[in-house]
Image (cartoon, rainbow, N blue to C red):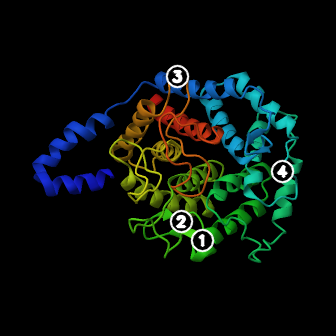
């Protein structure tokens, strides 16, 4: 149940005096739990150290049901988090670990230059970030890959811009287009990415963004009349988290006065309002944002929402008095209920495409892939660190 729904239920049952007491003894203590910046950094390091110990060799392929190279999207998201951690906790071992991985994969998208799959392109976001630190970085294949896609219609729908048919893809590939735009100054990359974004937002399945509610359906299979068992819409938490994070990562490299920035900012603000209404009393978000189906903590979506909200506060786009308590609750919830002493992250939903994936979740269950969840957590932790460190 969200805080808003809890409030409405409390008013009906106890009256306004009762709901005031509810906030004083339940909500406010969570929102006031503001750790020191060094404590946030310690938890982020712990989660990352757990991962780097367990996956000491970044070149080793994954082996869940089948062999996949370590440049797949799940690992690529981890490196997004690692690069974020590097910015607040500069350590050469982080750079060396990521560089060894990039060198092994020859700074090339998974499945080569001719892939048009966003999942294959995600790794290149970290190649770009490493290129800002290393003079010998090689981004020729990344640029060639985007050039190929910009000339290749999707044969499944006939659209030159119709490649992002699932909202996860927006996070996997859209920031890369913006990064290459920033690198080259060539506005073609920016313009093509925005056309692909608008196609997903407004055309795919009739439009995957529900403008009225400020939330996204995962793909065309989940738009109405599809609904959850309780009759509610299916807004997958991590899927919405992917879009929310993508908006942040794109705006981070776009000129603030550009038309694209303003367009993405508008969606970011609308999503922020919608997501705030969905937060659980304990600080987490459910795997399904508005449905009671699979009502439980979920770490990856929660971390991505923390990432976006903390960033929005720092930019002055989200009111701190409204969104900071939500960030504090989210962080406190993850640290107290998901982060193990050794850095393992519980309540992490496995790979999939809707709230049913990887169930049942728990504090101790190991998801099929641990890498993307760690990346999501590091993104949220680093942005939260920045607002805590500035207070």
Q: Secondary structure at mark 4?
A: helix
Q: Earlier in the sequence, mark 1 or mark 3?
A: 3
Q: Are marks 2 and 4 in contact (CB under 8 Å)?
A: no
Q: Where in the figure is residue 111, as x and y percent of width and height? A: 85, 52
Instruction: Determine which of the numbered discs, if any, sits on residue 88 in the image.
Output: none
Report the residue marked by disc 3.
Answer: 42
The first of marks 4 and 1 along the sequence is: 4
Q: Earlier in the sequence, mark 2 or mark 4?
A: 4
Residue 142, labelled with which disc?
A: 4
Question: Distance of mark 1 from mark 3, alpha carbons?
Answer: 41 Å
Cα distance, mark 3 to mark 4? 34 Å
Q: Which residue is mark 1?
A: 220
Distance from label 4 to label 1 (Cα)?
A: 29 Å
Horizontal side of 226 relative to 62 (left or right) equals left
* Nearer to us in this view, 61 or 321: 61
Cα gap from disc 3 to disc 2, whole angstroms: 35 Å
Q: Quadrant of the C terminus?
A: top left
Q: Is residue 380 left or right of residue 107?
A: left
Q: Are the residues tagged 2 and 1 within 8 Å (C-beta)?
A: yes
């Amino acid at each position: 149940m969200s805080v808003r729904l809890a409030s409405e239920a409390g008013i009906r049952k106890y009256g306004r005096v009762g709901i005031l007491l509810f906030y004083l003894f339940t909500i406010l203590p969570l929102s006031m739990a503001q750790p020191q910046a060094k404590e946030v950094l310690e938890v982020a390091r712990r989660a990352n150290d757990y991962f780097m110990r367990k996956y000491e060799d970044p070149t080793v392929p994954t082996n869940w049901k089948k062999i996949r190279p370590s440049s797949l999207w799940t690992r690529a998201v981890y490196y997004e988090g690692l690069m974020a951690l590097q910015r607040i906790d500069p350590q050469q071992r982080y750079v060396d670990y990521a560089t060894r991985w990039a060198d092994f994969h020859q700074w090339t998208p998974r499945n080569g230059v001719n892939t048009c799959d966003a999942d294959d392109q995600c790794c290149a976001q970290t190649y770009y970030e490493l290129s800002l630190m290393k003079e010998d970085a090689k981004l020729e294949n990344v640029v060639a890959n985007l050039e190929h896609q910009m000339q290749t219609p999707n044969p499944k729908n006939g659209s030159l811009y119709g490649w992002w048919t699932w909202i996860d893809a927006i996070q996997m590939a859209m920031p890369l287009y913006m990064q290459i735009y920033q690198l080259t100054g060539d506005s073609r990359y920016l313009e093509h990415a925005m056309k692909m974004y608008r196609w997903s937002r407004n055309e795919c399945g009739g439009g995957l963004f529900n403008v009225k509610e400020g939330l996204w359906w995962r793909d065309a299979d989940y738009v109405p009349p599809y609904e959850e068992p309780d009759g509610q819409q299916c807004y997958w938490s991590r899927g919405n988290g992917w879009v929310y994070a993508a908006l942040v990562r794109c705006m981070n490299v776009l000129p603030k006065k550009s038309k694209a920035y303003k367009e993405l900012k508008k969606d970011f603000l609308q999503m922020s309002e919608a997501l705030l209404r969905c937060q659980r009393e304990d600080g987490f978000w459910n795997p399904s944002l508005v449905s009671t189906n699979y009502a439980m903590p979920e770490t990856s979506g929660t971390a991505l929402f923390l990432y976006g909200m903390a960033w929005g506060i720092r930019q002055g786009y989200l009111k701190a008095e409204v969104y900071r308590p939500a960030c504090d609750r989210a962080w406190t919830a993850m640290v107290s209920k998901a982060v193990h002493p050794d850095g393992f992250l519980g309540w992490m939903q496995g790979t999939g495409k809707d709230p049913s994936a990887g169930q049942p979740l728990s504090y101790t269950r190991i998801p099929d892939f641990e890498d993307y969840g760690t990346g999501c957590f590091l993104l949220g932790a680093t942005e939260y660190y920045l607002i805590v460190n500035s207070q």
